[in-house]
């Protein structure tokens, strides 16, 4: 399986999941997702489908006007029957509700609610623009106000402690745990060093093929969100970690179809996003108990460190693959206490 085939396979799997999910939505919804096909990723379409399923399940369960209907009974004119108060009731429902599929309680904060409301607005806009409905009550409902959160990242000493722990954790292990650790140490250290040293996304990391690594130019070819390819450059520490891992990788016989993957799981197949997320969680809790560290927080760590070193927000945005520099400024360019402290002495009220 070559690199292109990997991303094609992911799209294929998402497309098949979407087709199955569309069977659980009103029949008219298929027109909307068909139209989205050329402008959105398969992952976005699948996410929207899950969100809209929650909306229609809410209508059938909570709205008295539709409690005697089934999903197949719903037609596009149902959208015209709803008023802004119905949308507001749905927005309130999203805070806490019981999943009709799993029976588990689901909760949404302001960001989760806004995402689901954005999906519903997009859904309404499609039919309104095509004059298949005459009202769009979603525009009459205010979207949740998002409150800025502090950027969660690792401090420099925590980064060093994390990498040191991965490198030397075997010193305190015995038996099967030590054997497993020794088997995956170089791989795990290479993954963490790569994420912390380049800021690439976890999906970009697991999608890498061994041929994407160029040691002559110290670059890796990554497949960005939206389908673009880009060369991201790395330093000596990343190069060394990758070379150490590749020496171990040569002794692994991969399963058919996974020969080109850069990082292998213990099952000798391309490692997945969930596996890397679990690795980050496992190792990070050894160096910090107060921060919830995920692969994305490693990306924040890199982005913030790069900004502090260069002061160039446009460089940070380019390297991270952001189309809008404001995204970078908001989520990664944390000035930190050291910069804020400068403000204390920057302005003089009276000359001495």
Image: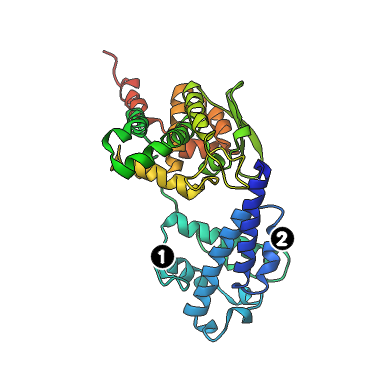
Residue 319 is situated, as x and y percent measured from the top left of the image, at: 56, 31
Res 209 → quadrant: top right
Above or below: residue 182 compared with residue 111: above
Decide: is 118 above or below 202.
Answer: below
Q: Which mark is residue 106?
A: 1
Q: Is residue 197 left or right of residue 286?
A: right
Front position in the image: 301 or 180: 180
Q: Separation of disc 1 and disc 2 at Cα?
A: 30 Å
* Residue drawn where x is 41% and y is 35% of the image: 185
Up the image or down, 300 lies above or below 53; here it is above
Image quadrant of residue 292? Answer: top left
For the point 68% across and 43% down, the residue is: 4
Q: Where residue 99 sits: x, y (%)? A: 44, 70
Crowding around mark 1 (Cα neighbors within 10 Å: few <14, some 14 to 19, many 20+) is few
294 vs 337, left or right, is right
At 61% from the left and 20% from the top, the residue drawn is 216
- Residue reaching furthest bottom? 68
Disc 1 secondary structure class: strand
Confirm or deny contact between disc 1 and disc 2 (CB under 8 A). Answer: no
**Which residue is under mark 2?**
35
Q: Residues within 10 Å of mark 2 (few under 14, many from 20)?
A: few
Residue 146 horizontal side relative to residue 209, left or right? left
Task: Indicate the quadrant containing the N terminus: top left, top right, bottom left or bottom right.
Answer: top right
């Amino acid at each position: 399986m070559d690199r292109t085939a990997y991303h094609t396979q992911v799209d294929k799997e998402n497309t098949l999941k979407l087709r199955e999910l569309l069977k659980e939505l009103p029949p008219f919804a298929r027109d909307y997702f068909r139209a989205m096909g050329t402008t959105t990723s398969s992952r976005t379409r699948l996410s929207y489908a899950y969100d809209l399923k929650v909306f229609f399940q809410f209508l059938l369960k909570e709205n008295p006007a539709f409690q005697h209907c089934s999903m197949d009974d719903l037609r596009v004119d149902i959208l015209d029957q709803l008023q802004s108060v119905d949308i507001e009731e749905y927005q309130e429902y999203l805070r806490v509700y019981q999943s009709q599929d799993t029976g588990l309680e689901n909760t949404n904060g302001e960001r989760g609610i806004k995402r689901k409301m954005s999906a519903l607005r997009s859904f309404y806009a499609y039919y309104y623009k095509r004059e298949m409905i005459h009202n769009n009550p979603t525009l009459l409902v205010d979207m949740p106000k998002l409150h800025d959160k502090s950027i969660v990242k690792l401090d420099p000493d925590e980064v060093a402690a994390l990498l040191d722990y991965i490198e030397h954790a075997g010193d305190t292990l015995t038996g099967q745990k030590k054997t497993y650790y020794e088997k995956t140490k170089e791989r795990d250290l290479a993954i963490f060093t790569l994420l912390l040293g380049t800021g690439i996304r976890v999906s970009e990391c697991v999608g890498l093929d061994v041929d994407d690594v160029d040691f002559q130019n110290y670059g890796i070819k990554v497949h960005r969100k939206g389908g673009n390819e880009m060369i991201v450059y790395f330093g000596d520490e990343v190069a060394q970690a990758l070379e150490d891992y590749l020496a171990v990788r040569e002794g692994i016989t991969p399963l058919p179809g996974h020969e080109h993957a850069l990082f292998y799981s213990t099952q000798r197949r391309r490692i997945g996003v969930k596996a890397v997320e679990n690795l980050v969680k496992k190792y990070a809790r050894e160096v910090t108990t107060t921060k919830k560290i995920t692969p994305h927080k490693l990306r924040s760590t890199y982005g913030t460190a790069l900004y502090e070193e260069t002061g160039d927000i446009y460089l940070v945005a380019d390297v991270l693959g952001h189309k809008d520099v404001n995204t970078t400024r908001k989520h990664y360019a944390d000035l930190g206490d050291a910069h804020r402290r400068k403000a204390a002495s920057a302005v003089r009220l009276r000359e001495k």
